[in-house]
């Protein structure tokens, strides 16, 4: 009888797996579980087995029937799924049609670079400071070591404001105390150094990103551009710290393999002064046409704050030292994006901006 | 400053290559910005024209027989200025001229030509192409031109910073090269003046502006051209050869750096010199032939009658050394730097002399410069140098002494520098120890007055690359906090990007007429703009953005959404920095400007392409404000010069105007040549920041369900939507209204003429329980009643 059960189940599995529709499944059900079905027949024949065998065989038959019912259910589901698939495959989308996009806006490369720079210096412990773009001569030049009639002023072609269009000097401001009244467009972000040091006592760790102006216009100079000023003044600051900050900044902005190099130079408000070169990111410092074969690019000016500047804001230069540097943000941004004509930055051509 | 390496090697005989010298100079702060090789090559030699025969049928060509020492050659030449017997440069076949021309045998008019006779320009000597270079009759035939000219040579372009006037000469650069290489300098000597009466008188009226005036006299000079190698040396350094005496002063200038001036002594009235201030309005004609009107601040060199030179800037025409000059008064003076600079700028005269005097010259060195120059004059122009000098030097400057502490050097540089090293480098620069750690500074180094100046010298000579890279502890631990402003600004920018606005950055100055169209405010103007298109500081961002829209349209881009976040410049006190030493000279508030024209969304297969309008702009602004955490913005009609009256509106934040928006006024669109459907906004960024919330308070989500109801009203078409919203909110006494959405506005049949239908979706919710239908019905009833009473609203079925 056991053999008979197994044979019937195998036969039923075979039949159901070949079933193509509901009728065939129903036919199988009748054949095995109908009034005269073969599995139903087995149940009836239990009466003729010895009583001692009956419970064991009875359980076998019940299990076989349950198994058969599971097979029936599976067969029904498989047919339903097949019909659904047929239905679903009737129509297809053209997935190659363009999606519905919403054109995103694009940040200006200079403001992106500025944000990155502010972020890098925040991690190095520098806060953002602010100052006016229309400045007094006193803060832009005199207190930074450019006395009137000094040739160092030729280093920065200056835009002056028409005195007739200037407002009167604010109460208590430098011109009310005898400083030159003539206003100018700041030629560098360095006047913020003076303002920051007048406003607070050391330690000072600030950066100031912003617009600066020089009367100069060609593919590599625009009359307005952006600089970031960095000033770090407290006890015990040395030129080695300046190199540390410069190096950390260059690596954070351009990548970990970037090298920095200092060359002696002159700025009236720093001493010693340096031009800072970075290894050319594009050619990896090997030398190419853009870096004139040297592998280096001049990106910023730096130096130890001139003791006269510190004394001018009332600090004791014997005790307090510091470094400062200023970098052209536009140039840094152009280097990152391999752009060569600076003037493109301020045309605000959508075809340019949307490449970003 | 152009430096001849051949000359430099004479003064400091290093065995380094040209490139090594250039690198070494750059490494100590004398940046070599370029180099130029000069030389004609071995194929050009001196040759004598034996015969010159005109070629038949040509009006200018001649056939010449030319002897170059090795033989006679026939050469065709078209120059007009030579005759048989002249010695001229001949380029042999195979020679390559400096401009790249290669000389070959050629047939000219059927005549064989075996070379070329050369003009100065063809040899790269000058621009002169009027004829052949005529050489002196005693030049040996066959001698290469390079040998005659002292070539080949390499000329370096050295960028000398304004603090280093001492380096504006070959001797100055040689001193630096010597300091870094250890090879001693060999400065050409000159005999001292000795004793003697000179046939001239010199007085200095203004010793402050002229601390020293030193003069020598040379008699019996013969004015003529300098030898070729002298001319070449001047030209290589960018100075035009003029005549032997003038060339000698320029040669001394290039060698020693001190400006010298030769006067024709016999043209000086009374044979006297008076150094004085000019009289206001006094006329004078300078060497360049320009008539100048002098100011009282100008220092002049006058003779017995009139100014004969602008002190330290340029000589005058009347006492110029000319062909008939025989007696020279040679001036070597020291003038006050600032005064020279003022005069130079006032008259727009930037000369080799003014460039140096305004940086500060070595008054002690003036004497040697004069003696050396006087000897050069005699060498080049003959004559006799009279013994004796006139030296008006009432207050000689003693040497400057500076204390240099090795400990301080180490502290500033961040690397240990010992006493021996300090000693080594300061001696290399010819500083002399005078005891107690003090050093006496040579007179030509006027820039070394403080310890820090000497520290810089030590640093640059030992090399900036020897300074270690050390990160300050602040860079390791003390990260600065992200400021609320930074965060809010980033959030606003994200919203603007999501709305498709590209960020513009415009110049802060632009044409005043552009500003006038969009803003009635008077701007601050530049005194010296590059162009009138950049003459006024912007008082609004709109003008720049409108120019950008125009630029894009002109380049075929019709859909433009731009924003700019930047300052405007208003001639009034700055409210945030109004007074004291930290006051800002003018008001520089930040603004957010927007400009929008073209399609709302790009046209595609699924739609888009419809024109953006006021509500696109307003929606973008609403989203920006939402991103900034500004919760209660209101918009109300308000006129603005740049905006169309139909849509000109004000943004109100916390009860105060914080910007304006609307369609551009037709006058504006016409001026900037942009479409009529251009929409503009300018928001007061400072006010927005003041009311922004960087980190918003969060409340979780509601626990009880909301009840949704729709209500539609018919009202007079002139009733603003905001009025209806206000009344709906006012009717909600128990604060159950969670959200009101205005989802439909309709005019037209069946709504009567002059009226409109407005539909609202309401979401009602109580925080502490599930609302019942009865409660919702009651609120809707109250809203209906209030709108009926207040704005005559009828309920639409
Ligand atoms: Zn490169």
Image: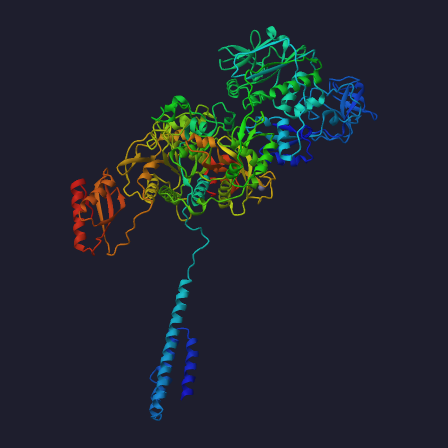
Q: Residue furthest front?
A: B436
Point 60% across, 31% down: residue: B429
Above or below — where is B701 with respect to B239? below
**Camera-nearest residue between B25 and B601:** B25
Pick the residue in front: B398 or B370.
Answer: B398
Left or right of residue B265: residue A34: left
Q: Is residue B564 above or below residue B370?
A: below
Please state which of residues B164 and B157 is positioned toward the viewer in this rendering: B164
Image coordinates of residue B146 in percent, x first then y, are 73, 27
Q: How many discs mark residues in the rendered view?
A: 0
Note whether residue A304 is visible. yes
- Return the x and y of residue B587 as percentages of the image width and height: 36, 30
Q: Please say whether residue A348 is visible from this viewpoint.
A: no
Q: Which quarter of the image is occupied by the N terminus of chain B?
A: top right
Instruction: Specify the farthest residue to the right.
Output: B71
Which image quadrant for residue B86? top right
């Amino acid at each position: 009888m056991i053999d008979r059960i197994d044979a019937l189940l195998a036969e039923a599995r075979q039949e159901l797996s070949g079933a193509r529709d509901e009728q065939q499944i129903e036919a199988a059900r009748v054949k095995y579980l109908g009034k005269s079905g073969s599995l139903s027949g087995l149940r009836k024949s239990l009466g003729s087995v010895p009583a001692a065998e009956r419970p064991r065989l009875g359980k076998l038959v019940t299990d076989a029937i349950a198994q058969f019912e599971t097979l029936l259910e599976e067969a029904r589901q498989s047919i339903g799924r097949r019909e659904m698939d047929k239905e679903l495959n009737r129509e297809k989308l053209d997935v190659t049609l363009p999606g519905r996009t919403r054109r995103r806006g694009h940040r200006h490369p200079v403001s992106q670079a500025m944000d990155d720079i502010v972020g890098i210096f925040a991690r190095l412990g520098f806060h953002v400071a602010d100052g006016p773009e229309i400045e007094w001569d006193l803060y832009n030049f005199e207190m930074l070591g450019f006395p009137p009639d000094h040739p160092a002023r030729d280093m920065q072609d200056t835009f002056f404001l028409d005195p007739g269009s200037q407002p009167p000097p604010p109460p208590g401001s430098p011109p009310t105390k005898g400083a030159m009244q003539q206003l100018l467009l700041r030629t560098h972000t360095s006047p913020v150094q003076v303002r920051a040091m007048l406003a607070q006592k050391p330690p000072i760790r600030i950066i100031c990103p912003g617009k600066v102006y020089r009367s100069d216009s060609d593919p590599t100079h625009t009359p307005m551009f952006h600089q970031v000023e960095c000033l770090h003044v407290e006890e015990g600051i040395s030129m080695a710290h300046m190199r540390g900050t410069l190096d950390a900044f260059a690596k954070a902005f351009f990548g970990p393999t970037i090298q920095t190099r200092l060359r002696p130079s002159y700025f009236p408000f720093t001493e010693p002064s340096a031009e800072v070169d970075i290894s050319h990111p594009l050619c990896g410092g090997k030398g190419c046409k853009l870096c004139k074969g040297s592998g280096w690019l001049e990106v910023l000016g730096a130096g130890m704050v001139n003791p006269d500047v510190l004394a001018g804001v009332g600090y004791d230069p014997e005790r307090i030292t510091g470094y400062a540097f200023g970098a052209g943000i536009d140039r840094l941004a152009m280097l990152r994006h391999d752009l060569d004509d600076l003037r493109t930055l301020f045309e605000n051509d959508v075809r340019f901006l949307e490449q970003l | 400053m152009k430096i001849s390496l051949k000359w430099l090697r004479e003064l400091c005989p290093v065995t380094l290559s040209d490139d090594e010298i250039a690198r070494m100079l750059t490494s100590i702060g004398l940046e070599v910005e370029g180099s130029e090789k000069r030389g004609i090559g071995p194929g050009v030699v001196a040759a004598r024209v034996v015969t010159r025969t005109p070629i038949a049928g040509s009006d200018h060509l001649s056939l010449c027989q030319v002897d170059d020492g090795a033989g006679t050659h026939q050469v065709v030449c078209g120059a007009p200025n030579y005759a048989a017997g002249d010695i001229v440069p001949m380029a042999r076949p195979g020679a390559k001229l400096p401009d790249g021309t290669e000389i070959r045998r050629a047939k000219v008019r059927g005549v064989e030509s075996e070379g070329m006779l050369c003009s100065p320009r063809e040899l790269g000597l000058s621009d002169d192409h009027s004829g052949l270079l005529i050489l002196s009759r005693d030049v040996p035939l066959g001698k290469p031109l390079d040998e005659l000219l002292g070539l080949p040579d390499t000329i370096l372009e050295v960028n000398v910073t304004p603090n280093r006037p001492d380096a504006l000469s070959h001797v100055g650069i040689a001193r630096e090269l010597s300091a870094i290489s250890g090879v001693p300098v060999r400065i050409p000597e000159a005999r001292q003046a000795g004793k003697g009466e000179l046939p001239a008188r010199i007085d200095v009226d203004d010793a402050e502006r002229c601390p020293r005036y030193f003069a020598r006299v040379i008699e019996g000079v013969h004015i003529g051209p300098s030898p070729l190698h002298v001319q070449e040396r001047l030209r290589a350094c960018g100075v035009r050869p003029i005549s032997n005496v003038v060339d000698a002063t320029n040669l001394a200038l290039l060698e020693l750096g001190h400006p010298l001036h030769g006067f024709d002594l016999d043209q000086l009235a009374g044979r006297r010199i008076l150094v004085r201030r000019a009289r206001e309005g006094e006329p004078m004609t300078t060497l360049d032939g320009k008539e100048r009107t002098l100011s009282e601040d100008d220092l002049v060199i006058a003779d017995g009658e009139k100014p004969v030179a602008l002190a330290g800037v340029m000589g005058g025409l009347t006492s110029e050394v000319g062909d008939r000059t025989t007696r020279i008064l040679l001036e070597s003076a020291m003038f006050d730097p600032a005064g020279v600079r003022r005069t130079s700028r006032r008259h727009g005269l930037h000369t080799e002399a003014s460039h140096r005097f305004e940086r500060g010259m070595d008054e002690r060195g003036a004497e040697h410069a004069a003696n050396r120059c006087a000897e050069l004059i005699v060498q080049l122009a003959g004559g006799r140098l009279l013994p004796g000098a006139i030296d008006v030097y009432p207050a000689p400057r003693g040497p400057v002494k500076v204390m240099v502490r090795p400990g301080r050097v180490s502290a500033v540089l961040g690397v240990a520098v010992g006493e021996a090293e300090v000693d080594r480098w300061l001696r290399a620069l010819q500083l002399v120890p005078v005891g107690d750690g003090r050093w006496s500074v040579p007179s030509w180094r006027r820039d070394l007055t403080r310890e820090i100046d000497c520290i810089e010298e030590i640093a640059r000579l030992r090399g900036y690359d020897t300074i270690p890279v050390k990160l300050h502890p602040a860079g390791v631990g003390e990260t600065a906090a992200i400021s609320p402003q930074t965060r809010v600004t980033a959030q606003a920018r994200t919203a603007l990007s999501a709305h498709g606005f590209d960020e513009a950055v415009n110049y802060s100055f632009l044409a005043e007429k552009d500003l006038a169209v969009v803003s009635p405010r008077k701007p601050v103007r530049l005194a010296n703009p590059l162009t009138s298109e950049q003459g006024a500081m912007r008082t609004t961002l709109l003008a720049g953005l409108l120019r950008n829209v125009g630029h894009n349209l002109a380049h075929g881009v019709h859909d433009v959404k731009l924003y700019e976040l930047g300052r405007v410049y208003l001639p009034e006190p700055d409210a945030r920095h109004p007074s004291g030493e930290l006051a800002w000279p003018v008001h520089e508030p930040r603004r957010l400007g927007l400009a929008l024209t073209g399609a709302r969304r790009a046209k595609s297969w699924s739609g888009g392409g419809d024109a953006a309008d006021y509500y696109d702009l307003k929606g973008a602004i609403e989203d920006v404000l939402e991103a900034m955490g500004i919760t209660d913005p209101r918009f109300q009609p308000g006129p603005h010069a740049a905006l169309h009256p139909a849509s000109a509106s004000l943004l109100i934040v916390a009860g105060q105007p914080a910007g304006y928006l609307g369609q551009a006024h037709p006058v504006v669109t016409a001026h900037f040549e942009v479409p009529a459907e251009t929409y503009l906004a300018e928001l007061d960024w400072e006010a927005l920041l003041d009311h922004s919330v960087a980190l918003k308070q969060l409340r979780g989500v509601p626990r009880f369900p909301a009840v949704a109801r729709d209500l539609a009203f018919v009202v007079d078409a002139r009733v603003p939507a905001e009025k209806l919203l206000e009344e709906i909110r006012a009717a909600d006494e128990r604060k159950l209204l969670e959200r009101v959405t205005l989802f439909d506005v309709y005019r037209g049949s069946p709504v009567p003429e002059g009226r409109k239908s407005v539909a609202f979706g309401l979401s009602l919710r109580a925080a502490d329980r599930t609302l019942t239908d009865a409660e919702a019905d009651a609120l809707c009833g109250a809203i209906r009643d209030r709108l009926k009473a207040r704005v005559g609203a009828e309920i639409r079925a």
